[in-house]
Image (tube, rainbow, N blue to C red):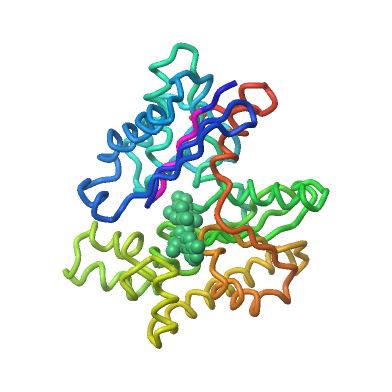
Amino acid sequence: MKILVINPGSTSTKIAVYENETPLLIRNIKHTTEELAAFPRIIDQFEFRKNLVLKALESEKIPFDFDAIIGRGGLLKPIPGGVYEVNDVMLDDIIHAMRNHACNLGCLIASELSLLLPGCRAFIADPGVVDELEDVARITGSPLMPKITIWHALNQRAIARRFAKEQRTKYEDLDLIVCHLGGGISVAVHRHGRAIDANNALDGSGPFSPERAGTLPAGQLIDLCHSGRFTNDELKKRISGRAGLAAHLGTTDIPTVIRSIEAGDHHAKLILDAMIYNIAKEIGAAATVLYGKTDAILLTGGIAHSDYVISRLKERISFIAPVYVYPGEDELEALALNALGALRGELPIQVYK
Ligand SMILES: Nc1ncnc2c1ncn2[C@@H]1O[C@H](COP(=O)(O)OP(=O)(O)O)[C@@H](O)[C@H]1O
Ligand SMILES: CCCC(=O)OP(=O)(O)O
């Protein structure tokens, strides 16, 4: 069986072709800020990113012939984890999505390309809106604003399963805290295979990150909204996109920040250390969800490549549980395996309503 995998991220479009479990192509196309700035909205990048996928296949001489195309799912309504067939309700929700993120393009491109091939199916799996929260985790101090989770469900689950396999046990038998350290930072509590708590890494809660504000002081935010200094869209960008390290230091690139620190930039050190401090606090809070009985803490995502960040994080969190580091992400393989499992009847194909 042949699977095309499409993972549009904030700074890249990742593509893979699998023949059963074997990868035939893995391609990471990076996008510069200037290149993407030409598109007023993320949805406007649709043709650009779709054509990049087609060009990558053409340049590798891979025939356009697939049993399924799977995209990293978008910011839909909250849904349980798993594989979903792309349908009209999903496409309509994505076109009218309240939240902007490049992953919204995943199901749109998968759907459009699948229509070119009779019998080819379009799927998404474990999108960022996967919601398996316990009821108690859903309640905030205002009934007007129940908790929403937006997190790296796909990669966190793939890494948690990889860890379980390495430990010769089952994901469903473990109690884990998983932290994805990327453009956004998510911390989730996985209790026996269910993510019972997770932050909103996009525009809500948790530690600040390379490009997100994380939890903010609510009163000050309201005052800023009414200050007349910013439009609605500008303020949203100051929460998601131009926030966190980008706002403080003008870059989201950790190696650049570390070079500044090594060159004696005390402000850069203060900001990066503050980000690490906030991540550690979020992980500490997650440990209370498990009553302190955590089998392991897994750190993953691009920033997990950074010794500076990981060594300082470990200093603060190692007392909770053993810490394992999985730099980067496993999203392409996770998507491919989800599509294969669905086609083979090994995984249920859920219907988005
Ligand atoms: N080798 C590396 N060393 C340190 N930081 C890195 C490295 N590679 C990527 N990063 C950082 O990881 C972040 C992006 O993480 P990634 O998981 O690729 O993104 P996302 O989760 O947004 O898709 C950026 O802040 C980037 O600077
Ligand atoms: C939308 C999923 C959570 C997130 O923040 O993803 P990125 O880090 O890839 O932007």
Q: Position of residue 108 (x, y in %)?
A: 38, 31
Q: Position of residue 206 (x, y in %)?
A: 50, 66
Q: Is residue 167 left or right of residue 230?
A: right
Q: Which residues are magenta?
A: 4-9
Q: Which quadrant of the figure has residue 188?
A: bottom right
Residue sitting at the far right:
168
Q: Is residue 146 something that shows in the picture?
A: no
Q: Is residue 110 visible?
A: yes
Residue in front for this viewpoint, 184 or 88: 184
Is 40 situated left or right of 249 in this image? left
Give the image location of residue 271, x and y in percent: 42, 79
* 155 w.r.t. 47: above or below: below
Residue at point 39% right, 33% down?
Answer: 56
The structure residue drawn at horizontal position 56% and vertical position 37%, both measured from the top left corner, is 335
Locate residue 248: give its quadrant: bottom left
Magenta stretch prevailing secondary structure: strand
- Relative placement, left or right, of 339 versus 346 is left
**In which quadrant of the rendered image does the N terminus lie?**
top right
Residue found at x 40% / y 43% = 13
Numbered label tally: 0
Does the segment drawn in magenta span residue 58?
A: no
**Residue at position x 38%, y 35% from top?**
93
Q: Nearer the viewer, residue 101 or 325?
A: 325
Q: Residue furthest left?
A: 228
**Residue 175 in the image, given as x and y percentages of width and height:** 75, 57
Q: Looking at the image, is 28 positioned above or below residue 351?
A: below
